[in-house]
Image (spheres, rainbow, N blue to C red):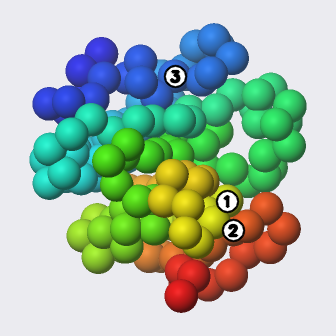
Amino acid sequence: MKLTKNFNSEEFNCRDGSTMPESVLKNIKLVAEQLQILRDNVGVPITVNSGYRSPTLNEAIKGSSKSQHCAGEAVDVEVPTIDNLVLAHWIAINLNFDQLILEYYVKGEPKSGWVHVSCLNEGNRKEVLTYDGKMYQKGFPN
């Protein structure tokens, strides 16, 4: 199912092969609309590493019990030609998001980690965090 000019629902499907519930499609579409803004500006494809996550997969990978992935409200993305720190900064300035997390990024290694971005229909917190695998910190590394 086509969600935006460059994104379809299959890109956001759960990696364990389980079917995405109809109830999360409206949330995935909202996320895809924000990613389309990014895609239009960078001019190259965006890699969706993780979109919708079934509760079974979320538990298997030890994801948060409150993971927005399970509601179709979050994605983990990368753009192959852009440093993930630069990508996170761009999203922070230009997109409407609930939570933005630069995850597992190592300074000096532009392709390390990924960027988690979530969107809500209303009440987005614009929370910016960095996660190194051990702890969350507000903002981005210097």
Q: Which mark is residue 79?
A: none
Kind of element beneath mark 3: loop
Seen from the viewer's position, the closer of residues 131 and 21 is 131
Q: What residue is at 46 percent from the left and 45 percent from the top?
A: 77
Query: Helix or strand or loop: what does disc 1 sit on?
Result: loop
Q: Quadrant of residue 88?
A: bottom left
Q: Which residue is mark 2?
A: 131
Residue occupying the far front of the picture: 108
C-alpha distance separating marks 3 and 2 = 24 Å
Q: Amino acid at mark 1?
A: Tyr
**Depicted 43 relative to depicted 19: above or below:** below
Q: Earlier in the sequence, mark 3 or mark 2?
A: 3
What type is the residue that disc 2 sits on? Tyr
Residue at x 54%, y 80% (from the top left corner): 140
Assess whether mark 1 and mark 2 are in contact (beta carbons under 8 angstroms). yes
What residue is pinned by disc 1?
104
Does 15 sit above or below residue 127? above
Name the kind of residue labelled 3 in the image.
Answer: Asn
